[in-house]
Each structure stands twice: as C-alpha cells, then as structure tokens.
Amino acid sequence: MMTRALSLPPYADFLGVAADRDEAGVLFFRLGFAAKVIGRPGFLHGGAIAGLLEIAAVGTLLDALAGETGVSVKPITVTVDFMRGGRERETFAAARISRLGARIANVEAFAWQDDREKPIAGARMNLMLRRG
Amino acid sequence: MSDTFLPPSPELDIAAAARMVVTLGHNGAIGAYYVAHGEDWAELAIDYRDDLVGDAESGVLASGPIITLMDMATSMAVWIKRGVFRPQATLDLRIDYLRAATPGRSVTGHGECYRLTRRVAFVRGYAHDGDPADPIAHVAGTFMMTDEA
C-alpha cells in the first residue's frame, strides 16, 4: 500500500511540527524543542502545545479525507485540557476521529513526551466540513 | 497603621512587565505585543504573518496563534486582578470560532479575569480583527496557581 504524503500548513513549519507514521501506518506528529515554544521558564507554552494538538487533529482528519477532492475543514470549537507541564524536550501528538459526518467532524488529540500513557495535554476539536 | 500605606503605582509596573513578558519565548515568536489593560483585563495583539497561516489556500491564521494570544491575555488579566505575578498554569481553555479571521488583519485578544479564588482563576475573553463588536472568537478557561500544594 502506498503511503500518502501529508501536507502541513505554514504554521506547522513555523512551530517546528513534522508528521510521521508508526509501523502500523498510523499518523503521529512531533514538535521539536526550541526556544520559540517556551512559555514560563522551564516549560512549553500552552499555546504551542495547543498548536501541536490542532495540527495533529486537522492533519489526521485531512488524511482520512484524502480520497475526496475539494473538501475543506474549519474549526468551530477547540477545547484544550492541560494535564502536566510540558518540559523542554520533544513532544508527540496523535489524534483519533470520533465521528466523521457529512458536515461535522469530531476529533480528539493527545500530546505526550516520555510516556504515551501520561499525556501532557488533550484537545477536542469540532470542525465543519465543506465538500465540493 | 502600616496597612494604610499604598505601594507605588502597580499600574505602571504591570504595563511594563506585560510589555516585557510578551517578547519572550513563544509569545515573542508569534510577535505578540501589549495593547492595553484595566483593573481585571488585558489586551494583546499579533500582526498577520504568512508563517502563522493554518490553511494555505484561504490564508486564514491557524488556531494555535489565537490560542497562544488568548492564553497570554487571560493569564495577564489574572495577574492584574490579583495584583502580583504568581506562577500559574492553564487548566483548560475553550475557543469558539465565530468566523474566520480576515487574512492580512491584526488580531487583538481581550482577556478578562472574572473570578479569583486562592487556587483557581476563571477567565473569559474574545478576539477580534478590527471591530470588537464583530469578534472572531470567544474563549473561556481556568488557571491553577502552581505555588500551592
């Protein structure tokens, strides 16, 4: 099976987020550590983590829609929960589509650092789909 | 009595501190700058930039920079209302996008702290791209004080 390339927005390049796939072909995203993602001293900025979660959610949704042409997605609501402080190292994120409807998609994303079972943040995004 | 003594103008200190804080780290990277503040609110802004775009086709800003802006504006509102810079962490933040930000326009984030307890601060706010009466987003969130067990 051919692995599709996922095109990320300019904001992902700015933030330093890249997309990757695990052995099973499931998408995940990495945010490299840099001074530009720091918030309070010693911790990542919540906004940078939220940005990673958004890129993971939208990227995973666009990947699921990759068979369709002319479909665009627009966030309506984004709710971010911050569970642990993000430390000064690489951060990962992955998303799961809870429901992909005709007009609305509900997507959940999680971010983690050392241990995937200990997320540092999670986000729920409800997005509007525009087809054709 | 000693408690009638008023500290020297905290207003000026807050504006100066806000101007400095927004230049650091991620806030500085998205180009955030101080606009104004009142007794329980703060306003920050970012200018439109191509590298903050979330949808290359439409040119609309990504959600991330707006969340960063609102996180910082509401965070600053907590410090202003409390009158001191206490360490705090965002517990949650919800953003409702009322409409897409117009490409090319600066975005202003207005953050307000409407309730303060010893350990939690409750905030709300909005973002607009020129007309506060026609906001692009509404936010609601909470902060935890991190200097208490």
Image (cartoon, coloured by chain):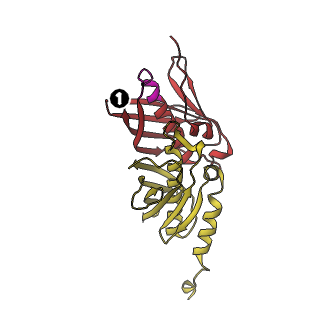
Type of residue at label 1? Leu
Q: Residue at x 60, y 78 (%)?
A: B9
Residue A35: x and y, percent? 68, 46
Which residue is most to the bottom?
B1
Which residue is most to the right?
A35
- Magenta stretch: includes residue A67: yes
Mark 1 = which residue? A100
Residue B110: x and y, percent? 47, 61
Residue B7: x and y, percent? 60, 80
Would residue B116 be seen by someone viewing this image from the given angle?
Answer: no
Chain holding disc 1 = A
Of the pair B89 and A67, the residue shown nearer to us: A67
Magenta range is: A60-70
Residue A62: x and y, percent? 45, 28
In the image, is B67 to the left or to the right of A17? left
Q: Vertical placement of A120 versus B22: above or below?
A: above
In the image, is A77 to the left or to the right of B2? left
Q: Residue at x 47, y 61 (%)?
A: B111
Would residue B66 be seen by someone viewing this image from the given angle?
Answer: yes
Chain corresponding to red in the figure: A
Q: SS for tag 1?
A: strand
Chain corresponding to yellow in the figure: B
Of the pair A23 and B98, the residue shown nearer to us: B98
The part of the image, by quadrant, that contains residue B83 is bottom right
Q: Which residue is drawn at 51% across and 47% down?
A: B103
